[in-house]
Structures are given as C-alpha cells and as structure tokens.
Image (cartoon, grey):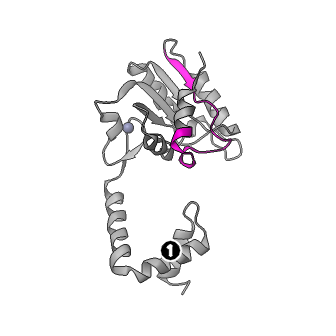
C-alpha cells in the first residue's frame, strides 16, 4: 500500500509541520472513511486556496488580493509598521485583535547555522516603504532567541530615518517562541511593554 497513491499521500501529510508518520496514517484513514464529505471538501478548498492566494506586493503577507486586505484597509493606521519574520506571526497578532497598524513580513531570520543572510530577507522592501510613506514608528517583533535578536539588531542598524521611532516588543516572548504558540494576552502585553530603541 505504501508504494501506492495512498502511500504518497501519507508521506506528504507526514512532512507537514508538527505531524509525523503516525499522525499522517490516522489522517489518511480518517479521510478515506469520509471520502464523499471531508475529503471532497478538502480537495475543493485546497484547490480554491491554491488558485486565489497571492503574496502582497507591499508587505509579503499572503491573501486573496495584492495589496492585501490589511494594506488596502482605510481603517488601519498606516504610520505604524510591525516587522515580523513569518506570515504566521501576522495571523497570530491579528488573532489577538488589538493591533491596528500595518506589517512587513521579512520572510525569516538571519541565521549563521541555516546560512540565511540579509539578502535572503526582505529588509530592503521595509526601508523603501519607510522612505516613501509617512511612517512614524517601526515595531520590530522578532522572537527572543539568538537569531531573532541578531535580526532585530541588523534591522535597527539599517534604519537611517531619524524621525521614525524604532521599538522592540518586550521579551515576555519565550526564548525561541513564535507568536502562533502564544496566547493573546501574552502577545498584547509584549506589544504594550515595547521599548524604544532610539
Ligand atoms: Zn499587505
């Protein structure tokens, strides 16, 4: 069976984040038993998301339009940009429901171990946005592990606009903790307790 299409499905699902082979087996059995309901809906929704999702040309978020819903909203404060490493961080901060500014997803963190350098991240895009728009504050929201701190320091060193406030979220974020693992109140207090760097 494992050489069959079902085997391929188990292998692909088992490679998804947080899942392993045993979970993949359970999921595939679940789907096969519900072929005409759950599996059919999953196929349709996956195809729809595949067809409609697009990366925002401004902030790198993924949405159904570019500019994304956040960048094109007239209700958001366009003078504040929160810099995050990943789209999942945008979703976690949005879920907490208190932040009303914009985002910039740089697409990772600087890492000597993984060989991720400044050119692999969209930091230039952030600097260009700051030059062109009336930005009053940049909130750098990286995790508190070594790579997060290195990335924060690098971004800070690249920001030359004197009249823009640069702040970092307070380190109530557990070391290495990504936003999507945190509850809303921890995220809110990390933002409220943010420290000015300049
Ligand atoms: Zn956007």
Q: Name the foreground residue: 182 vs 117.
A: 182
Can I make out residue 107 in this image? Answer: yes
Q: Name the foreground residue: 115 vs 152.
A: 152
Q: Is residue 135 above or below residue 12?
A: above
Q: Position of residue 44 (x, y in %)?
A: 32, 68
The image quadrant that residue 196 belongs to is: top right
* Residue at the image position 35 percent from the left and 58 percent from the top: 49
Query: Disc 1, ligand 1: is the CB inside 8 Å?
Result: no
Q: Is residue 37 above or below residue 130?
A: below
184 displayed left or right of 62: right
* Residue at the image position 43 percent from the left and 25 percent from the top: 80
Can I make out residue 121 in this image? Answer: no
* Residue at the image position 59 percent from the left and 15 percent from the top: 198
The image quadrant that residue 128 belongs to is: top left
Q: Is residue 197 above or below residue 6?
A: above
Q: The N terminus is located in which quarter? A: bottom right
Q: Using a 10 Å C-alpha cutoff, classify the residue at mark 1 as few (fewer than 14 neighbours), some (14 to 19) or many (20 or more).
A: some
Residue extending farthest to the front is 185
Label 1 residue SS: helix
65 displayed left or right of 155: left
Q: Is residue 60 above or below residue 130?
A: below
User: Which residue lies under the disc numbered 1?
Assistant: 27
Q: Position of residue 76 (x, y in %)?
A: 34, 30
In reply to whether residue 85 is colored magenta, the answer given is: no
* Residue at the image position 68 percent from the left and 39 percent from the top: 145
Q: Position of residue 59 (x, y in %)?
A: 42, 36
Span highlighted in magenta in the image: 164-186
Q: Position of residue 151 (x, y in %)?
A: 62, 33
């Amino acid at each position: 069976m494992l050489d069959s299409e079902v085997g391929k499905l188990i292998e692909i699902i088992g490679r998804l984040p947080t899942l392993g082979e045993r979970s993949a087996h359970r999921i595939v059995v679940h789907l096969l038993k519900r072929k005409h309901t759950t599996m059919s809906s999953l196929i349709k929704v996956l195809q729809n998301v595949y067809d409609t999702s697009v990366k925002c040309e401004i902030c790198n978020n993924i949405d159904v339009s570019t500019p994304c819903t956040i960048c094109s909203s007239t209700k958001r404060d366009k003078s504040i940009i929160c810099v995050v490493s990943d789209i999942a961080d945008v979703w976690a901060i949005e879920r907490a429901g208190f932040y009303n500014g914009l985002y910039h997803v740089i697409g990772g963190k600087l890492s000597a171990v993984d060989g991720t350098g400044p050119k692999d991240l969209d930091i230039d895009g952030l600097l260009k946005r700051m030059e062109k728009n009336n930005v009053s504050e940049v909130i750098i929201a990286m995790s508190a592990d070594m790579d997060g701190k290195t990335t924060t320091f690098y971004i800070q060193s690249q920001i030359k606009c004197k009249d823009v406030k640069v702040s970092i979220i307070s380190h109530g974020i557990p070391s290495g903790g990504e936003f999507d693992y945190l509850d809303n109140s921890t995220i809110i207090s990390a933002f409220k307790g943010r420290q000015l760097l300049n």
